[in-house]
Image (tube, rainbow, N blue to C red):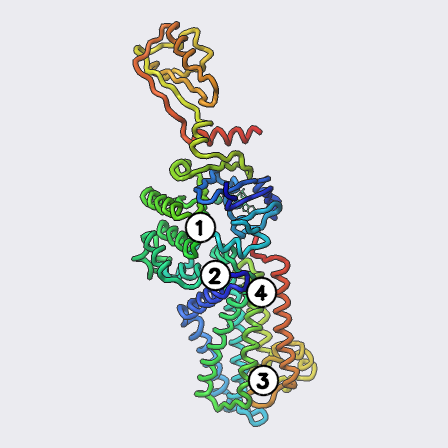
Amino acid sequence: MSAGINGHAIAAIYKFEMNRTFRTIWQSIAAPVLTTTLYLIVFGAGLGGRISPFHGVPYGAFIVPGLIMLSVLTQSVANASFGIYFPKFSGTIYEILSAPVGALEIVIAYVGAAASKSLILASVSLATAFLLVPLRVDHPILMLMFLTLTAFSFSLFGFIIGIWADGFEKLQIIPLLVVTPLTFLGGTFFPISVLPAAWKAVALFNPVVYLISGFRWSFFSQGDVNIGVSLAATLGFLSVCLLIVWRIFQTGWRLKN
Amino acid sequence: MASPIISVKGLNKTYRTGFTALKDVNLDIERGEIFALLGPNGAGKTTLISIICGIVNPSEGTITADGFDVVRQPRHARSRIGLVPQELTTDAFETVWNTTSFSRGLFGKSPNPAHIEKTLKSLSLWDKKDSQLRTLSGGMKRRVMIAKALSHEPEILFLDEPTAGVDVELRRDMWDVVRGLRESGVTIILTTHYIEEAEQMADRVGVISKGQLILVEEKTELMHKLGKKELSLQMAEPLAALPAGLEAYALDLSSDGATLTYTYDTQQERTGITALMTALQKAGVRFRDLQTKQSSLEEIFVSLVHQGDRR
Ligand SMILES: Nc1ncnc2c1ncn2[C@@H]1O[C@H](COP(=O)(O)OP(=O)(O)O)[C@@H](O)[C@H]1O
Ligand SMILES: [Mg+2]
């Protein structure tokens, strides 16, 4: 191996993480897809008929982008954080620390695997949604872009949590207390425009609003905020996460004594 | 002499707790040798190994592996080193084959199923290659950890207490594996608190106690130089008490009076045996047999660690 990047190590960790996913396919893929499907059935096909369409988009279709974002966000964070936290917990991290790999390989492999998994999950959920509700995608390329950006950003975010956490409680506290509420309040089930003016102002501080709005725009050409603003916010979040990861590795690992 | 494959200079380690685990450790490991690091629990053996392997950061000092600084050129240094840690930590749901192949990739080597196969066979793991690690016994897991460390063909192998909690049979198997590796040119550093292990395996022994390397010696030299010998004399007739005139020899009389034991230091120019014989004759003590016994590394070790305590 030269002094360059250790590609074999990236491949090894990536494969390890993906094996873990497929070994636990019920828990890691089937369960989140089922959750999304249940939401679609209850709120879309069930209640949806009684809610009038927003700008010509039936309610069942309206919630699809938000639901997919909800599962991409939570699963990316959960997977990436668990992926790097578990070796710390079990002790197998010794091997990664003693191997000729640096921060770059570790981040690419763990974040790449977590994001891949989220993309698989999103694809399955999307396919299911097409079967259940009348869905259309106006801007497929943009949609894929949003999905990929979000999956990577939140996997990075999860990775940071996994490095920071020193117990299972800390591992779950951010997803449960921050990510899930922000997503529910971020316009998954309703457009921000239906909120009273004061709450609307508050909602605009919620970064998830921009993600969901942008993602929804790629389906129906309409969102809560301008598509350009959404895109900028998404890229902004990605940059912040990259910056934090870079700082973590600069100032030592939190992994070594 | 060829340059050492590992060189540790002025190494100090103070953990964040403020505890100083290593104090000014200096050590050179020669190419191709088996070096045993011997010391009681908590002496700092694992800390030393972990620093060389890049798992723990040194507080002070420099370490090179095959000429590469382990802190400043970690990739070069680490790709040459295989580590079998003390704790049995394995990915429970992985198979033996996958986890061994994973290690090879992690260390930057392209896949080589033939090498993995050879490694697994040499450790009698071949028929377990598709078993998940959680189904293996402790001894088998230990072998898997060795296979992982050997998967990337390291020049240097660290074995941290390889036979702790391993049954006698497996221990002998492991010694055979280690000897085979040495024959193929791998340098091996093992830690142990079993003296027997150092005695059986090592070319050189380092004794560490309370974070200080108190001695590094060729094993045979160590036993030769520091070995105390015991001379036991079987009495023709049991003695009721030690006869007068023998006080200077610090003799030990067994409770049944049948055996007199004299301890002497082979390091000393004069062992005092001739004088003792003369004195015994003068005192009229007759014996019918005698034996001498070299003290084991264990006894040497205990006496060294005690000396260390007194310093
Ligand atoms: N992470 C740590 N933080 C603080 N003290 C530690 C840490 N690891 C080991 N020590 C202490 O350092 C000393 C040496 O430990 P270790 O190197 O594991 O010894 P050995 O392997 O010889 O049994 C022990 O007293 C241990 O308690
Ligand atoms: Mg130890």
Q: Earlier in the sequence, mark 4 or mark 3?
A: 4
In front: mark 4 or mark 3? Answer: 4
> Which residue is identified by label 1?
B84
Q: Contact, CB < 8 Å: mark 2 with mark 1?
A: no
Asked if B137 appears above or below A118 in the picture, the reply is above
Q: Secondary structure at mark 3?
A: loop
In front: mark 1 or mark 3? Answer: 1
In front: mark 2 or mark 1? Answer: 2
- Number of the label disc, if any, that sits on residue B272: none
Query: Do the dots labelled 2 and 4 sit on one chain?
Result: no
- Number of the label disc, if any, that sits on residue B108: 2
* Label 4 CB sits under 8 Å from any ligand 1 atom: no
Distance between mark 3 and mark 2 Cα atoms: 50 Å
Q: Nearer the viewer, residue A184 or B199?
A: B199
Q: Earlier in the sequence, mark 2 or mark 1?
A: 1
Query: Do the dots labelled 2 and 1 sit on one chain?
Result: yes
